[in-house]
Image: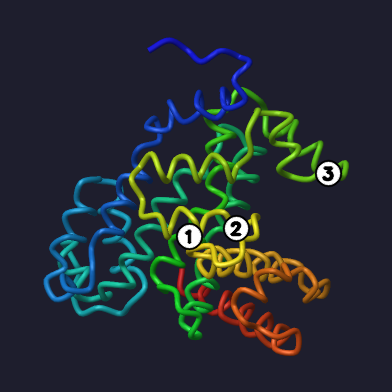
Amino acid sequence: MSALPKSDPNHALNQLLAKADDIAVLPHVVFRVMEVNGEEEFHGTGLEHAIITDPGFSAKVLTLANSNYDLPRKIASVKEALLFLGFKSVRNLAMTMVAYDMFVGKNDEDSLRRRSWWRHSVDTASCARWIAKSGRSVSPDESYTCGLLHIYGKTMLDRLGEGSYTECSHLIEQGMDIREAELQTFGCDHVEVIVGAARQWGFPESLVQGLKYLDPPLPKEEFGAERATTAMASAIARLARMGHKREVMEIPDWSLDVLGITAEHAESMVEEGIAEITAAQLNL
């Protein structure tokens, strides 16, 4: 198939998505992990098969099982790790650990930036799962995945885009909106990239919509709660890093409206969300 003409407004996005399978480990493992459901929890067969397709992935799960607990003997199989750690815990932690590999750069500056993205992704995932469990009518596990992947488009731009994220960062530091800076640098932005990639990888539409965390949903638009959960969790994760600079106004008003959270309740939600993020960090 011939290359798209440069005049095509989607040229940069399509060119980047054509290379998306170059980072196939994370998308394909996460997709398989996502497919595993609670009915398989007792045997963990589906999750075990997803993990053992990648030797490095398996090693990390086994390391986690053997290092975080005072065990009478070493755990030697992924199946044992699943039984010991628990189905949902391993599923979420496995996604997190694979995601970390994709946030390591070629040099110190790249690695620092990508690890910052990874930290924000993991914090957002933990907070999103907590928000979902607070009765917001969305799946906690799917909310976790949305949080984990919501800025993954930045890493894809950094790794696969025809531009430099260092240059993009300079524009952001000068006050340019992040999506505008990415568009100017790469021809597309990180939300477009991860949404396009999620569709290309066959993710469910509810997850795809949940990744559009910077775009308020239209009235009565389907999966608005998923999108709002990701948006609110991402904002709380940013506030968790800001320490004394916390401001509830950082939470998008539209996300509070969609989730039915009043302004009075928002402040306590922020504090509780930050506490959840802190607790989750201790378990990584």
Question: Residue 79: x percent and y percent?
Answer: 15, 65
Q: Which residue is mark 3?
A: 173
Relative to 9, say whether 124 is above or below: below
Of marks 2 and 1, which one's residue comes earlier in the chain? 1
Q: How many numbered marks are there?
A: 3
* Disc 2 crowd, CA 10 A, few/some/many (<14, 14-19, 20+): many
Q: Position of residue 275 (x, y in %)?
A: 61, 82
Q: Looking at the image, is mark 2 or mark 1 nearer the viewer? A: 2
Instruction: State left or right for residue 25 relative to residue 250.
Output: left
Looking at the picture, how far across and down is residue 164, in whole percent? 67, 28
Side (left or right) of 252 relative to 130: right
Choose the circle earlier in sequence order: 2 or 3: 3
User: What's the residue at 74%, 44% (across, down)?
Assistant: 178
Mark 1 or mark 3, earlier in chain? 1
Q: Looking at the picture, which amino acid does disc 2 mark?
A: Tyr
Q: Could you tell whether 40 is left or right of 268 in the image?
A: left
Q: Nearer the viewer, residue 236 or 202?
A: 202
Q: Are marks 1 and 3 in contact (CB under 8 Å)?
A: no
Question: How far, Cα to Cα, is label 2 from label 3?
Answer: 21 Å
* Circle 1: element type: helix
Q: Amino acid at mark 1?
A: Cys
The quadrant in which residue 276 appears is: bottom right
Q: Residue at horizontal 67%, vertical 38%?
A: 109
Q: What residue appears at the point 36 percent right and 50 percent down from the top-left corner?
A: 203
Residue named by callout 1: 146
Amino acid identity at mark 3: Glu
- Front one among 253 and 74: 253
* Residue with the mark numbered 2: 213
Image marks 2 and 1: residues in contact by CB distance under 8 Å: yes
Residue extending furthest toward the front: 220
State the separation of the CA atoms marked 1 and 3.
Answer: 26 Å
